[in-house]
Amino acid sequence: MTGLSLTTERRNELAALLDDDQRLRTEFPKVADYLDTAPMLKGTGDAAADAAFDLRFVHFMTGGESADPYWDIVGPAVAADGDRRVVNGGRVWHPVGDLAEFAGEPQSECVLFLCWPPGWGDPMASRALHAFEQAGGGRLIFIGEPKGGKTGDDAFFDQLATSWSLEKQDPHHVSWWNLGDIAQGWIRRK
């Protein structure tokens, strides 16, 4: 992992900013929110890597010079895992199971989180939704493209339209310029 090299002047600027909570919250509220939340996140299990990520985040999000702050922050944490590029060297921050594992969990008080489920006719999304409904689940967070896009199958979207109500859609969801994805919260109709 490549370390971030800061000048003494920039180190002093960051130290002064981090020492002045009022200024931090006024000038960089999202950075202040992140710093409030970061200690509660599980992280990678590597304290030095987590601290380096936090430093890159604060530096580039508070005016550190960068042509692409996203990759300057995340890039050093990207590693190879076989033929895939992954963040965190291939370690998973939260385990993700398959439908068989999902079936063994109580669902009535859970939220089904579907983030970019496979599309183009792949039934994964509709099968997960059906199993969730059968188990009594009633809340869904969906991040992906609407019906006809690259995520979810038609049966998934048809079931949403029939048995679920859109509770919220994030109007500030950040998406790549070439994608039409959305972030939505759904509740099951009684």
Image (cartoon, rainbow, N blue to C red):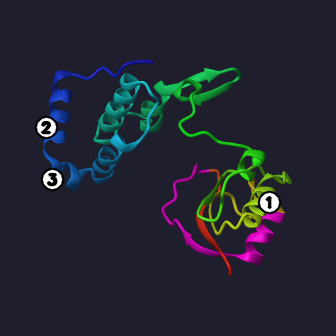
The part of the chain drawn in magenta is: 155-177
Cα distance, mark 2 to mark 3?
Answer: 11 Å
- Callout 2 crowding tier (Cα within 10 Å): few <14, some 14–19, many ≥20: few
Tag 1: amino acid: Ser
**Do callouts 1 and 2 mark residues in contact (Cβ within 8 Å)?**
no
Question: Is residue 148 in view from this perspective?
Answer: no
Q: Is residue 5 left or right of residue 189?
A: left
Residue type at mark 3 is: Gln
In the displayed structure image, the side of residue 2 where residue 65 appears, left or right: left
**Label 3 sits on residue:** 22
User: Which quarter of the figure is the N terminus placed in?
Assistant: top left
Mark 1 to mark 2: distance in Å?
Answer: 52 Å
Q: Amino acid at mark 2?
A: Ala
Callout 1: 10 Å neighbours few (<14), some, many (20+)? many
Task: Confirm whether the magenta stretch covers residue 185.
Answer: no
Is 134 positioned to the left or the right of 173 in the image?
Answer: right
- Do residues under tags 1 and 3 come within 8 Å of each other at their CB atoms? no
Residue designated by label 1: 126
Residue identified by numbered label 2: 16
Determine the residue located farthest toward the bottom in the rendered image: 190
Q: Earlier in the sequence, mark 1 or mark 2?
A: 2
| Label 1 – label 3 distance at C-alpha | 47 Å
Vertical comparison of 71 with 126: above or below: above
Q: Residue at x 74, y 76 (%)?
A: 163
Nearer the N terminus, badge 1 or badge 3? 3
